[in-house]
Amino acid sequence: ASRKGSEYNWAAVTIGGLYDIQRFDIDKDLGMAVTPYVGIAGGYDAGYMNGQKDTDVNCNWGDANSNTVSGGSGCSGGDDRSDYGFAYRATVGALFEMHQNLGLNVNYDYIDGTAQNHIWAAGVRLQF
């Protein structure tokens, strides 16, 4: 657990491709179908962290209202760092076509790089 005010920011930019496995028709008259897909991508990710654990003792010298240590022994100023590098992404998902122009897209992404992330997403797809 971290103290209030701690922050962690992370972002990834990847370029890749998706492969539609096969389109399974449910109702041809309405245009309903399911299309599962997989994908891979490569790119770049970066993160910045500024935080302190709840169990750490602050180095606020002489402040009687904070968790302090006199003499400076055993105190912690927190963790303030950033990192960046190569990242890859693997995707598994499906497009549920409700009509020939409207679908529901559901997918799972695993991103590994500076940090590991599991991302579930859903959205509406308009097709023209």
Image: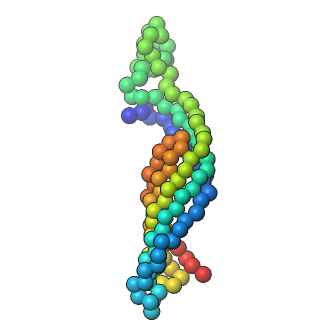
Q: Residue at x 44, y 59 (%)?
A: 108
Q: Quadrant of the C terminus?
A: bottom right
- Where does the image place residue 8, in percent across and percent down from the top left? 51, 39
Q: Nearer the viewer, residue 32 or 54?
A: 32
Q: Position of residue 124 (x, y in %)?
A: 50, 72
> Is residue 46 depicted above or below 97 in this figure?
above
| The one of 95 and 64 positioned closer to us in this rendering | 95
Point 43% across, 32% down: residue: 3
Which colouring convention does the figure follow? rainbow
Residue drawn at point x = 58 percent, y = 34 percent: 82
State whether residue 93 is above or below residue 109.
Answer: below
Which quadrant holds the N terminus?
A: top left
Q: Residue at x 55, y 77 (%)?
A: 126
As drawn, the residue found furthest toward the top would be: 71
Q: Residue 84: give x, y in percent of width and height.
A: 60, 39
Q: Is residue 93 visible?
A: yes
Up-down: is 112 above or below 57? below
Horizontal and vertical percent position of residue 11: 57, 47
